[in-house]
Image: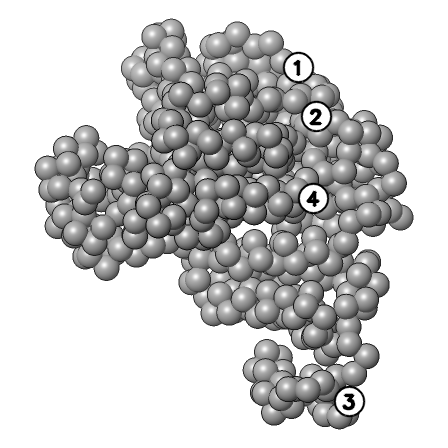
Amino acid sequence: MKPTAFDVETLLERHGRAPDRLVQLLRDIQAEQTWLSRDTLSVVAKALQLPLAHVEGVAGFYRFFHQRPVGQYRVLFSDNITDRMQGSEALLNDLCVRLQVTAGRMSQDGLVSVDRTSCIGLCDQGPSVLVNHTHAIGQLDGKRIAALSELILARVPITQWPAHWFVANDNIRRSDVLLGSQLEPGQALKAALARGSQGMLDEIKISSLRGRGGAGFATGTKWELCRKAIGTQHFVICNADEGEPGTFKDRVLLNRYADLVFEGMTVAAWVLGAKRGLVYLRGEYSYLLDALQAVLQRRREQGLLGSAILGEADFDFDIEIHLGAGAYVCGEESALIESLEGKRGTPRIRPPFPVEKGYLGQPTTVNNVETYCAASLIALNGGTWWAGIGTKKSTGTKIHSISGDCEYPGIYEYPYGTSVRTLLEACGARDTQAVQVGGPSGVCLSAFEFGRRIAFEDVPTAGAFMVFDRSRDMFEVARNFAHFFAHESCGFCTPCRVGTALVVKRMDKLAAGYGSRYDVDVLLEMDKLMHVATHCGLGAAACNSLHETIEKFRPAYENRLKSLYFEPGFDLDAELSVARHLTGRDDAAAHLENQA
């Protein structure tokens, strides 16, 4: 059914006809009509006084938006490497056979679409799927796939499917000061008010709290720069776009510790003088939205949000939640802000930084879920207390999302400075070959490195901790990550857009058994090029796992190489041209010519 102008008009009114609400508006339209026709996008463009090309560009950027008809049921299999290790591909093929549909296409009767998507944040209970972008189902097996197919064929509404399918277990295996906290709503905020805004900022600086999103920028410095920046208003943003494959800690924090998150945002607002806060919740976690909205409403009723918070004159602050629509790059703070403004999530050129010109061009501080939780604890217990935990350069604790080849996958909180080996022992890992720390963009550690410590000065991490035993093929791990980056590139810059695609092409060539040592050399050259030439961190990190697996697990690549460079159909001139194009110089081409 094609949306009518009246349908769209109703939603336009709901969103105040504001261009910066475009992503939210398109989400709502698609929720009602399943896809976004060009006619609908034309109505939206005209109503918001935006070029149609802009609206179509936004609709085409996010993978959860559809500009052509899709099935009434849209089943997306999480395609992280840990899901594949647990048999997701076999289950996907089983479902496709049962539903008589080809992966990536809609069934002929328009009933169902089945496809793959990036990690949906259920690595501790995979394989998993996301249905209609709103309902996550984990712990899949053949029996559950059979039942799921029967429900779809019978056209049973999702709301009538077994409720226990949609329960995402928190799986908290080890708690420390954060996960073990028992703060009452408002307790940390009262302490922050008692300290005064400058006093609270001082405590954050004394704590040496660093952002938990991976980069580790000093939170106190960020807040101070934002506080001093000139603007008509200041904004507090929570980055809940937990898109790094293998990471699911923010899912648990939002599910069980939402008050701690919102309290930390309110503490930041007190320091900055902000009146408005926004949570950017990844689209894959939309099933958390209703519960989070309920917590926000309760906090308003308790006087912890709204006007004159806790009776403090002129302390007005409230929080709203925006949903993403499937884009890993929006985890980068400037891309996230672009998305909040209703645009494609393309990272901005910096400077200026968000603390100077962020959301709507105003001073903005962006921190992630775990960082705001830590800020709440610091408000209550003080900066010196937090600085006494962990190491000098990495204070406090870190929450880890552990998955893969281990007996007890789940959430583990440890002080910074804890060894990788300690985490492996705690989660019941056996015969471990490698650990990917920090997700695909992080660090791949081999067995001789398990004595290293989780800390900014040694092994930094955004929270993912994927375990691979000796039965796993580390080439396939790197190939899965390569496909992920190629799929998630925003396409803005040529080195990333083309580079990630070329990496995938070379990796697939090796996987098919047609590769040579020259292909490995080219992959290493691509790593060098993308580290220095890409627009943002996504492209720069895209080859991290590739480089480290070649360096540390070389036999996994060598086993796939042909003994000769030239086989039937080998095009020397084409290979020489590619070599020169990729490297920008002749040495790789000369190397190939010598082999001839």
Q: Which residue is mark 3?
A: 595
Relative horizontal placement of residue 586, taking residue 23 as reference (left or right)? right
Determine which quarter of the picture holds residue 204: top right
Which residue lies at the image location 19% right of the left edge and 57% below the top edge?
A: 51
Mark 3 → mark 2, Cα distance in angstroms: 52 Å
Q: Position of residue 517 (x, y in %)?
A: 76, 76
In the image, residue 269 sits, relative to residue 572, either above or below, namely above
Residue 384 can be seen in this image: no
Q: Which residue is mark 4?
A: 85
Which residue lies at the image location 70% right of the left edge and 25% below the top edge?
A: 413
Decide which of tag 1 and tag 3 comes sooner along the chain. 1
Q: Position of residue 398 (x, y in %)?
A: 68, 30
Decide which of tag 2 and tag 1 comes sooner along the chain. 1
Residue type (three-letter) at the residue carrying disc 1: Gly
Decide which of tag 4 and tag 3 comes sooner along the chain. 4
Image quarter of the N terminus? top left
Q: Mark 1 or mark 3: which is in front?
A: 3
Determine which quarter of the picture holds residue 304: top left
Mark 2 → mark 1, Cα distance in angstroms: 9 Å
Q: Which residue is mark 2?
A: 413
Q: Which residue is mark 1?
A: 180
Q: Position of residue 262 (x, y in %)?
A: 46, 21
